[in-house]
Amino acid sequence: MTTNNLQEVTELLNSELLSYKKCCSYAADVTDPVLKEKLGTFANKHRVRYEVLLKYLGGQN
């Protein structure tokens, strides 16, 4: 993996983690149950993508 590729994947990791944290924070603050559920779903999707990227990086040794 080139340095440029590693930097791009790292940026994706950081973006997914930030999106996950934001969705979790918003879900904790809202009172609308439908919106809370949607935000929880979005948070889970970001977490899964984060874990996939992290696993990909782990396999690049």
Image (cartoon, rainbow, N blue to C red):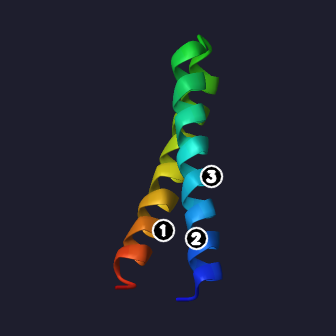
Residues tagged 2 and 1 counted as in contact (Cβ below 8 A): yes
Tell me the distance, in whole angstroms, between the alpha carbons under discs 2 and 1.
Answer: 7 Å
Tell me the distance, in whole angstroms, between the alpha carbons under discs 2 and 3.
Answer: 10 Å
Instruction: Compare marks 2 and 1 and give the one earlier in the sequence.
Output: 2
Query: Which numbered tag is attached to residue 53?
Result: 1
Q: Nearer the viewer, residue 49 or 14?
A: 14
- Crowd tier of the residue under label 2, counting other residues whose Cα lies within 10 Å: few below 14, some 14–19, many 20 or above: some
Residue shown at the point (48%, 58%) measured from the top left: 50
- Crowd tier of the residue under label 3, counting other residues whose Cα lies within 10 Å: few below 14, some 14–19, many 20 or above: some
Instruction: Compare marks 2 and 3 and give the one earlier in the sequence.
Output: 2
Residue shown at the point (53%, 36%) measured from the top left: 21
Question: Can you say which quadrant of the picture contains the C terminus?
Answer: bottom left
Query: Which numbered tag is attached to residue 15?
Result: 3
- Residue bearing mark 2: 9
Q: Is residue 15 above or below residue 30?
A: below
Residue shown at the point (64%, 25%) measured from the top left: 35
